[in-house]
Image (cartoon, grey):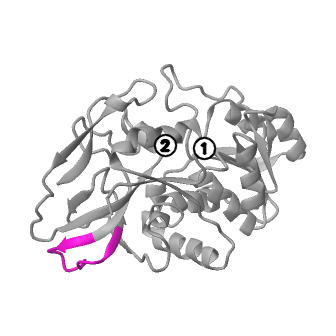
Amino acid sequence: MNKQLLFVKRPTGKAEADTWNLVENPIPEIGDGDILIKQHYISLDPAMRGWMNNAKSYIAPMEIGSVMRAGSVGEVVRSNNKKFKVGDFVAGTGGVQQYTATDGQGYYPVDPKLAPLPTYIGTLGMTGMTAYFGITEVGQIKAGDVVLVSGAAGAVGSVVGQVAKIKGCTVVGIAGGAEKCAYVVNELGFDACIDYKNENVASRFKEECPKGIDVYFDNVGGDILDIALTRLKRHARIVICGAISQYNNKTAVKGPSNYLALLVSRATMQGMVVFDYADRYKEGAMQLGAWMAQGKLKSKEAVYEGIENFPQTFDRLFSGEKLGKLVLKVIED
């Protein structure tokens, strides 16, 4: 049987357990040109909360009754497709279920001998692509830049900061709690980290970025984005990757009141959607993989187990109870 998590209710505010329904159905049959994937791990990302809303976005909203959308990695166990053979490991968007049948479009091969499978939905997957292209292409970093990264202990932010350091930047992170800040500085090599839960963020910005910032990579939105706008250097770049502080709002999203700083600083603020770089994923993965092999880039996955534990694991995205990339193992050994 195939355990599947169905999306059954559009949440208002926080997604509660009744947003989904866990069901069991027969493992799907495959037709000509199809493959059957036994999924090992699925990716949990803040963007999933946005996909639940019935609103215009960069991707169509999920339909009620559909399998919860999610990135995934697993093994091909049946194949009627010449491009894939039984025993291949592939990553794609298989949803929160144990098996998925697909024609293979959007799936790409991965090698568990080179890196653990969860890494392929983390640093070597969409998470890494978001970080890499977001900071290099949208952020346009160059050696000597002062780079500020919110959500610095999270999946994307942790890679963004490390890439910026590799590129010769001074990097200041923002994270919640002393433990996360210590991890960001001592393990990931950021130059400093501001604890937004226990420190005055505006004051600490002035201390750590006395001459201002060249690039702000924003994963959280809200008040921190507003404060960052006051510290921009001339021609600074703001990369809008996410706004996790706003995703569970029951009221309107809080926009920046300091936006005129963009005018004064001749700065830019640009959104980043990873799908825009789909034709360059191989390039990004090869570069990130090379840095990992050289010991310049660290990858951390917080792996939890059990498809039935999806709701409480998903909550960790917003409670902050994790370090690095959040991953759920959905297949039993």
> What is the x, y in percent for residue 195?
76, 40
Give the vertical position of 208 relative to 170 (above or below).
Answer: above
What residue appears at the point 74 percent right and 36 percent down from the top-left corner? 196
6 relative position to 310: left or right: left
Q: Is residue 78 magenta?
A: yes
The answer, for residue 302, to whether it is visible in the render is yes
Residue 46 — which label?
Answer: 2
Give the vertical position of 286 relative to 119 (above or below).
Answer: below
What residue appears at the point 72 percent right and 44 percent down from the top-left corner? 174
Disc 2 from disc 1: Cα separation: 10 Å
What residue appears at the point 26 percent right and 33 percent down from the top-left corner? 8
What residue appears at the point 31 percent right and 44 percent down from the top-left corner? 68
Disc with the residue nearer the chain's start (2 vs 1): 2
Mark 2 crowd level (few <14, some 14–19, many ≥20, 10 Å Cα): some
Q: Are marks 2 and 1 in contact (CB under 8 Å)?
A: yes
Residue 219 — which label?
Answer: 1
Region in magenta: 76-90
> What is the x, y in percent for residue 284?
53, 70
The C terminus appears in which quarter of the rendering?
bottom left
Residue 180 — which label?
Answer: none
> What is the x, y in percent for residue 11?
37, 27
Amino acid type shown at disc 1: Asn
202 relative position to 141: left or right: right
Give the vertical position of 329 relative to 232 (above or below).
Answer: below
Amino acid type shown at disc 2: Pro
